[in-house]
């Protein structure tokens, strides 16, 4: 099927983007993505899967772009009824003319095909045929997004250089609440327009490093059924672990209780309390070349947990006596060997940069990552974050981005510290 009208104007020198539209309820948002790309003088060629056509008709995109919509692998005949021989190699000609392949929304099915090299329609064949940068914006049910198969496929694609615009969290069309909704259209368009961050061609610029990363909250028991904790989801630490693995590092992940699936290649130690996390970190410290303390460790714990459940009956109030937990970061710095890089995190609610600079100096860290947790929609229990990474040499501001992108920027700083002999 080839549907379209004559292109509008002369855009021979414009950036050319193929927009792959997959079969999901978010397919209707692709029309707005087309408009935003055109506002930036980008020429758009839409490629639709068969399933996508169940949600949006090809004529919609043809009218918006002024170009035919490619909706089938082959066209049986031309308008004059003769066999269409050009369509047999159209995926090659389209692939060679692209500046970027964008897939939005990208379904779990298409991501799996990309990762496994399956080419059974025009879009998946185009992915294999193009040398242009590839950007995917997944959208799917929360359980599909969190399934180990989907996570593994995304890890494979990232390792091959595919840029992933992570979905946001919220109410999904299926009625569930959680991550899986298509990222904001503006964020997707910016990912297309941003130049790729230079990486080692094999994605292994951290090969030879062993990163000891902490993630998640700790739980300090009050009694056998209650505990003190915080709102940390562990997503930042897990994003760091995943990014580091894909850049060639060995990863030792010490994690508090989370609902996340750890990266398959990470060496995972699960803990619950601050004391357990401290013991796990210190026992593995001699193996590490880099320590990144992204966990939200409790600062205080009940001075004595009761052996049995505290009953409500007969109590108008309950007073808990708290005591400070150990300072894991300070102990790591104290024991660190020459050449070990130590990175801390600081969640602040006021004077964020000033407090972080003081913590950097006070604890003799190589770098500190600070964010204001009062900003709505980012930080704790969110897929997005906005941080400043501070070292003695630089301050890197990372505007609101996915936690995966923040992780990449943190690792970029670690790499610069190593290259500049800052450790």
Image (cartoon, helix red, strand yellow):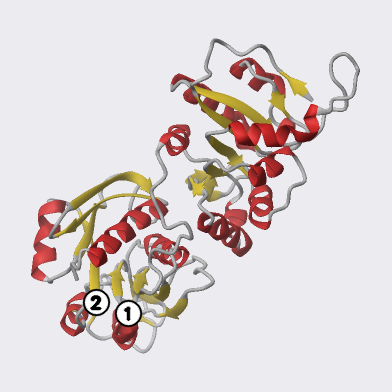
Q: Quadrant of residue 26?
A: top right
Viewer-nearest residue: 226 or 42? 42
Evaluate whether residue 403 shows in this view: yes
- How far across and how far down the image is residue 381, in percent? 39, 56
Viewer-nearest residue: 230 or 100? 100
Viewer-nearest residue: 311 or 247? 247
Q: Is 363 left or right of 299, judged from the image as shown?
A: left
Nearest to N terminus: mark 1 or mark 2 = 1
Residue under label 1: 288
Evaluate whether residue 344 shows in this view: no
Q: Is 190 left or right of 99, judged from the image as shown?
A: left
Please, is residue 66 above or below residue 112 in the view?
A: above
| Label 2 crowd bin: few (<14), some (14–19), many (20+), radius 10 Å | many
Task: Give me the residue at 17% from left, 69% from top.
Answer: 365
Viewer-nearest residue: 119 or 154? 119
Task: Give me the residue at 87% from left, 23% from top.
Answer: 77
- Indicate the secondary structure of the residue bearing disc 2: loop
Task: Give me the residue at 38% from left, 48% from top.
Answer: 197
| Label 1 crowd bin: few (<14), some (14–19), many (20+), radius 10 Å | many
CA separation, marks 1 and 2? 7 Å
Residues marked 1 and 2 touching at CB (< 8 Å): yes
- How far across and how far down the image is residue 330, in percent? 17, 77
Q: Which of the numbered marks, if any, corresponds to residue 340? A: 2
Please, is residue 105 above or below residue 287 in the view?
A: above
Task: Give me the residue at 21% from left, 83% from top.
Answer: 337
């Amino acid at each position: 099927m080839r549907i379209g009208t004559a292109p509008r104007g002369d855009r021979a020198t414009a950036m050319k983007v193929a927009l792959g539209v997959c079969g999901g309820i978010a397919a209707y948002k692709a029309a707005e993505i087309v408009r935003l790309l055109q506002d930036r003088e980008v020429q758009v060629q839409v490629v639709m899967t068969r399933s996508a056509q169940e949600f949006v008709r090809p004529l919609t995109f043809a009218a918006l772009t002024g170009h035919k919509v490619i909706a089938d692998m082959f066209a049986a005949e031309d308008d004059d009824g003769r066999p269409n021989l050009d369509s047999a190699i159209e995926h090659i000609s389209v692939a060679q003319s692209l500046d970027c392949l964008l897939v939005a929304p990208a379904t779990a099915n298409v991501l799996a095909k990309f990762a496994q090299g399956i080419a059974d329609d025009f879009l998946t064949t185009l992915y294999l045929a193009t040398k242009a940068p590839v950007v995917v914006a997944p959208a799917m049910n929360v359980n599909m997004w969190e399934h180990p198969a989907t996570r593994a496929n995304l890890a494979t694609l990232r390792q091959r250089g595919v840029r992933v615009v992570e979905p946001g969290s919220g109410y999904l069309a299926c009625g569930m609440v959680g991550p899986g909704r298509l990222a904001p259209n503006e964020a997707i368009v910016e990912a297309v327009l941003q130049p790729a961050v230079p990486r080692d061609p094999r994605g292994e610029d951290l090969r030879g490093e062993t990163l000891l990363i902490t993630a998640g909250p700790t739980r300090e028991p009050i009694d056998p059924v209650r505990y003190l904790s915080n709102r940390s989801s562990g997503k930042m630490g897990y994003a760091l672990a995943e990014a580091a693995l894909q850049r060639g590092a060995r990863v030792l992940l010490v994690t508090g209780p989370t609902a996340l699936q750890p990266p398959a290649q990470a060496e995972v130690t699960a803990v619950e309390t601050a004391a357990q996390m401290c013991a796990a970190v210190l026992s593995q410290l001699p193996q590490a070349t880099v320590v990144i303390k992204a966990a939200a460790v409790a600062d205080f714990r009940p001075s004595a947990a009761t052996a049995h459940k505290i009953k409500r009956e007969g109590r108008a109030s309950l007073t808990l006596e708290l005591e400070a937990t150990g300072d894991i970061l300070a102990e790591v710095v104290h024991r660190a060997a020459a050449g070990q890089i130590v990175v801390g995190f600081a969640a602040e609610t006021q004077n964020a940069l000033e407090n972080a600079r003081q913590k950097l100096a006070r604890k003799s860290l190589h770098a500190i990552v600070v964010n204001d947790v009062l900003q709505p929609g980012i930080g704790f229990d969110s897929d997005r974050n906005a941080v400043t990474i501070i070292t003695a040499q630089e301050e890197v501001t990372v505007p609101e981005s996915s936690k995966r992108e923040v992780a990449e920027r943190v690792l970029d700083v670690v790499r610069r510290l190593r290259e500049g002999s800052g450790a």
